[in-house]
Amino acid sequence: MKRTFNSNNGSNKRVCFSEDTKSDSSFSDDTIPPHHFHLGQDVYAAVTYFASMVQVHPRLYKRDGNNRLFPTKRGVCFSPMLWQSFVNQIEQINTSSSV
């Protein structure tokens, strides 16, 4: 049986809140955080270091009323080797479709 969390105030929800910096993970087009790379439209890749491993996280972001970007649940996590393989496959598809 699943347990649910009942919150009376939906505005209390924070996405990826950092206890260290006391800030959420939102940002604007003018203030892209370090190690974040714009991939197109509202898709950004963040390069992180966790548990002695480098990881690449491409993720879809959404804009709020103030035009700030917030991460959504739509994203994946790659090791650098898998990321490079993915990029090579995309380049191969783009090359073959342009011929």
Image (cartoon, rainbow, N blue to C red):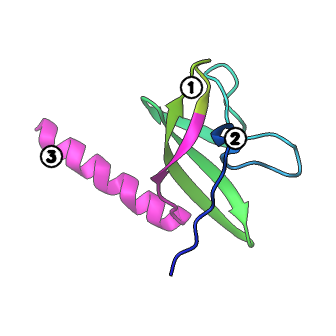
For marks 2 and 1, give the one nearer the viewer. Answer: 1
Position in image of residue 81 (x %, y %): 50, 66
Q: Can you identify the residue that label 3 sits on?
A: 96
Residue located beneath label 2 in the image: 25
Q: Estimate the spatial distance between the alpha carbons at disc 3 and disc 1, rounded to whole Å.
A: 38 Å
Circle 1 — which element? Answer: loop
Q: Amino acid at mark 1?
A: Asp
Counting from the top left corner in percent of width and height, residue 6 is at 63, 56
Label 3 packing within 10 angstroms: few (<14), some (14-19), many (20+) = few
Query: Where are the magenta residues, as a range?
Result: 70-99
Tell me the quarter of the picture where residue 66 sits: top right
Camera-nearest label, 3 or 2 = 2
Which residue occupies the foreground of this view, 47 or 99?
Answer: 47
Residue 13, position as x, y percentages in the image: 67, 45
Task: Read off the residue under disc 1.
Answer: 64
Residue 9 can be seen, yes or no: yes
Q: Between marks 3 and 2, how big is the CA–CA gap? A: 38 Å
Residue beneath the point at 45% across and 58% down? 84
Please state which amino acid type lies under the numbered disc 2.
Answer: Ser
- Image quadrant where one finds the C terminus: top left
Estimate the spatial distance between the alpha carbons at disc 2 and disc 1, rounded to whole Å: 13 Å
Is the residue marked by circle 1 packed among few (<14), some (14-19), or many (20+) residues within 10 Å? Answer: few
In this rendering, does residue 14 appear at all? no
Please report the residue visible at 39 percent of the width from the left and 52 percent of the height from the top: 87
* SS label for mark 3: helix
Query: Along the polypeptide, which appears first: circle 3 or circle 1?
Result: 1
Specify the label residue 91 is tagged with.
none
Q: Nearer the viewer, residue 48 or 8?
A: 8
Query: Residue at 68% of width from left, 56% of height from top?
Result: 48
User: How many dots with numbers?
Assistant: 3
Q: Nearer the viewer, residue 6 or 51?
A: 6
